[in-house]
Structure formats: structure tokens, C-alpha cells
Image (spheres, rainbow, N blue to C red):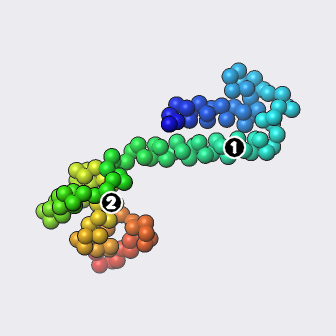
Amino acid sequence: MTTRIQYQKARTVLRSLIQGLDPETSIELPKDAIVNRIEINRSMAIALAAIEQVEARMLRRSQLPEGVGKTWTDEEVQRLQAEFASSEPIPLIATKHRRTIRAIEARLERLGLLRPDQRTTNNSFFGPVSRGDDE
């Protein structure tokens, strides 16, 4: 598995090469060096953008609760129902379950305990939740 350090090093090397510099010495490469060919340079820029996207995804993923993407167990669903029935705040429930607020609201909606218009997060499958003036 590629580590964050390996991505950072590859990013640094590619940036140097795109600028026409030797990555180790920072000395300008000869004008006829292969990295100065337009298609090679464009390809390196695309590779650099891909690495930056992977790093951004890794950073976002590292900030998510550890329960993200895990299957809901029957016991966890029962706890969720009990917590919601006792009017615990959804952010607190999310913290307890190590899930996002969005995941908690989606599960509550699926269980018929929350209407779509009561959600505070967007439902990515049906677009943003509309907010009426009567709330």
C-alpha cells in the first residue's frame, strides 16, 4: 500500500520535473530533455493532479468516523431507535455510533422515524432537502 510519504515524494518529484528541474539538485534540465516534451509534460501534470486527488480523498477519509461504511447490526439499529425515541440529539447519537449525522438521519428515515423534510443533511440520492417557511 502506498503511504502518504510516498505520495508526497512523488508529488515533489513530479512538480520539479514539470518545472524542468532535476528533482535531486534543482538544476535546470537540458532543453532537449524528455520531460520538456509537451505530451510528456502534460502527462506528468495529469499524474500530479491524480496524486493530489488521492491525497485529498485520504485526508477526508481520515477525518470521518470509524463506523463509516460499516454494515448496521440489528443491535445497533435497536440502540439507534431507543436513543432517538428518548430524544437524544442526532449529533450525539452519531458520535456514539461512530457514524456521520447524515448516516444516522438516513437510517432513521429508512426506519420510518424521520421524514425527508426533517433531515438536516442532504439526501444525495434525491437532491437537497427542501426547507419550507412553516418549519
Where disc 2 sits, the SS reads helix
Q: Measuring from the top left, give residue 12's x and y in whole percent.
A: 62, 32
Mark carried by residue 72: none
> Which residue in the protein does label 1 denote?
45
Q: Is residue 133 above or below residue 66?
A: below
Task: Name the residue: 79% across, 45% down.
Answer: 39
Is 40 displayed left or right of 131 in the figure? right
Could you tell me which secondary element the residue under label 1 belongs to?
helix
Question: Residue at coordinates 23% horizontally, 71% vertically from top-left?
Answer: 113
> Quick check: 85 left or right of 67?
left
Q: Say whether disc 1 or disc 2 marks the residue closer to the N-terminus.
A: 1
Point 61% across, 35% down: residue:
11
Q: Quadrant of residue 84?
A: bottom left
Q: Is residue 26 left or right of residue 101?
A: right
Q: Position of residue 89 (x, y in %)?
A: 21, 59
Q: Residues within 10 Å of mark 2 (few under 14, many from 20)?
A: some
What amino acid type is highlighted by mark number 1? Answer: Ala
Q: Which residue is mark 2?
A: 103
Residue 19 at what x, y percent from top left? Answer: 73, 34
For the question of whether residue 80 can be seen, the reply is no
